[in-house]
Image (spheres, rainbow, N blue to C red):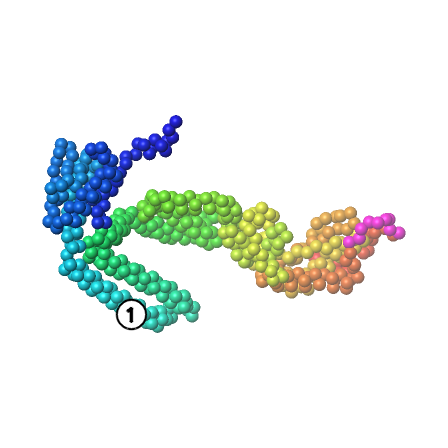
Amino acid sequence: MVSAAEEAAVSAPETAELKIANRSIIVFRATVLGENPEARVERARAVINEVVGGTDDVEVRLDSIQDDYLVLLGNRRAFIVSPKDVGPGDADVRQTAEAAAQRLRQVVGETQEARNLRFLLMAGGLSAAATLLFMGLLRLLSFCHRRLLSWLPDRVQRHTSALKVGHAQLIDSGNLLLVTRRLFGLVYWVLVLLLTYEWLTFVLQRFPYTRPWGESLNEYLVGLARYVLDAVVSAIPGLVIALLIFFIARGFSAFCRRLLERLSRPGTINWLNQETLQPTTRLTSLAIWLFALAMAYPYLPGADTEAFKGLSVLIGLMISLGASSVVGQAAAGLILTYTRTLRVGEYVRVGENEGTVTEVGMFTTTIRTGLGEVLTLPNSMITGAVTKNYSRVVQGNGYVVDTVVTIGYDTPWRQVEAMLLEAALRTPGILQTPNPQVFQTALSDFYPEYRLVAQAIPSEPRPRAVLLTMLHANIQDVFNEYGVQIMSPHYLGDPEQEKWVPKERWFSAPAQAKDEADKP
């Protein structure tokens, strides 16, 4: 059983290339007169070398025999061109035969030149002159490069010193000088390689045997330049359309920004104000530019190439793998922004973290505590936890201060409330308007729970911690002054004397003075 590879090898036509004096004449693809392409090449090479080596006056002619063409070298047949020898780029067998005959004439002419001493001396002289010119141009290029590098530091220092915003210099002269030196060095070596390439091409074309190499080098350079130029010219319409799309997106983005600024004025749209204006403007601009990029993508140079497609797939894969947490954090940041849960300057408590909000970002929120710590909290954690805002419900500017004490049932509650209010009165920074209040938040098994709630003046995070310290100190001082023990007893057994407050002790100091002040 014959494999697919063997079948392909059998079905593939056998070819052989005829090369004389380093120049390709024709590629044989058919068997003619019982000779396969390899045998035809050997026979044609022998005839051509024999005829060309024997005389200088050789004529190359073309003669037709039915569908075939004879390429004659003098009176001898050099080779036969069959219709099956027609290559992919040739129109018919006559065109193939004429092209082969023309290349053979060129070989005959170059062979005659190789035997001409005068021609060889002239070629050597031109090569020597080209070499001297090449060396001179290299020395001139090196001299210009050195002079440019010696002139560069002063110019860079002069221009970079002028690029300032206030007293801050935008660009470091050392880094700019290094980048400029490397750029000029790259240009220098490109010019050196280009001069070397042209010199080598010129010298190789002077001698008959190496002329095909020089022509191939020249054709490669011209083909490369033509390819680059065609690519640039063909990319211009797409670039014009892409730039037009980006200019339209830029103008529409500026229009939306001004429109949102007008809509953010008080009394226009409730959810759009000075706090939400900036993120709304950024989101709108981001959406416009993403849409513009998607529209301009097909018109970008190389957008339909495999490399560009592979890069797009790689970027999409990276985004899909790493964007889940990023998108979640960004969505949480948008929720915090538009619901206005937190504002900069407010004192909040998120879980076990408490402090003043200093920044509400897209992905994280920064809080400064009263102990000098800076906490960076992920926005998803804030949206998933209970947030206590001590600044939102106060009257005017400020924040809420509260503290809890538990006292036994044998202490009159009126006395405890009066002592807590007196401690608040003694604490500087706690406002008396609105008045501090005391709430009995729980009647536990062994003691009631008292919560003092007051409003403090706006201040930095650390003074709030100091304020709480002073408040706690004043509470201890007041309780000590009136002989009330701050203790939360637990039940161990029945006491010898019942724990209750007689009526004559209901208004113990300082509750008595407060009660008399409240009477009309």
In the shown orientation, is residue 388 left or right of residue 494? left
Q: Position of residue 132 (x, y in %)?
A: 23, 66
Local secondary structure at mark 1:
helix
Q: Position of residue 419 (x, y in %)?
A: 73, 59
**Above or below: residue 516 compared with residue 49:** below
In this view of the protein, which residue sits in the foreground, 71 or 513? 71
Instruction: Name which quarter of the figure residue 506 lies in.
Output: bottom right
At 44% across and 48% down in the image, what residue appears?
Answer: 269
In the shown orientation, is residue 312 left or right of residue 370? left
Q: Mark 1 Cα within 10 Å, few/some/many (few <14, many 20+)?
A: few
Q: Which residue is mark 1?
A: 143
Visible in this render: residue 244? no
* Amino acid at circle 1: Phe
Q: Main secondary structure of the magenta part?
A: loop
**Above or below: residue 92 compared with residue 275:** above
**Above or below: residue 316 compared with residue 137:** above
Q: Which residues are magenta?
A: 488-496
